Amino acid sequence: QVHLEESGGGSVQAGGSLRLSCTASGLLFSVEDMSWYRQAAGIKRELVASVTTGGTTSYSDSVKGRFTVSRDNDKKTLTLQMNGLESEDTAVYYCNAKIRRTILSDSRDYWGQGTQVTVSS
């Protein structure tokens, strides 16, 4: 069984920083694209940042220049460094990974349980 474990959420004042981590574990063949999503109360879940296995990154316009996404392929870990946090960043943040469980299987999406980030102004 594949599991994504997130950590690092919490509460911070506007302008502060937080670092989120996500680790994939379990019986799996490969981890492909990894991403962070977030969902604020009453709002549809949105893509925040992604990184490919080769290290190519992409960001939503709302976080570009403030957040940095990275990964460690050997440790199967995804990280989101969030600086210059704003109240609009308050949301539950979810780790997402496209994972192939065996060499013969297609990749499918797996999700972490979510971690709350609260930014007070």
Image: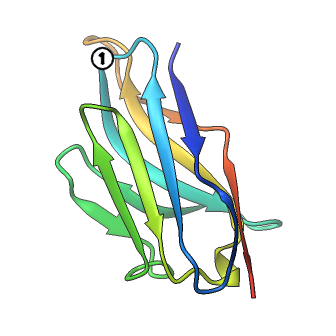
Viewer-side residue, 13 vs 73? 13
| Left-right relation of 42 to 54 | right
| Left-right relation of 42 to 71 | right
Q: Is residue 45 visible?
A: no
Q: Amino acid at mark 1?
A: Phe
Image quadrant occupied by the C terminus = bottom right
Residue drawn at the location 38% of the way across and 57% of the way down = 50
- SS of the residue at dot 1? loop
Residue of label 1: 29
Question: What x and y, as percent, mark residue 3?
Answer: 54, 24
How many labels were placed on the picture? Answer: 1
Please determine whether, in this image, residue 94 is positioned above or below residue 75: below
Residue drawn at the location 23% of the way across and 43% of the way down = 53
Residue drawn at the location 58% of the way across and 79% of the way down = 16
Viewer-side residue, 55 vs 6? 6
Q: Is residue 6 visible?
A: yes
Crowdedness of circle 1 by 10 Å Cα count: few (<14), some, many (20+)?
A: some
Question: What x and y, as percent, mark residue 57?
Answer: 28, 62
Please determine whether, in this image, residue 84 is positioned above or below residue 49: below
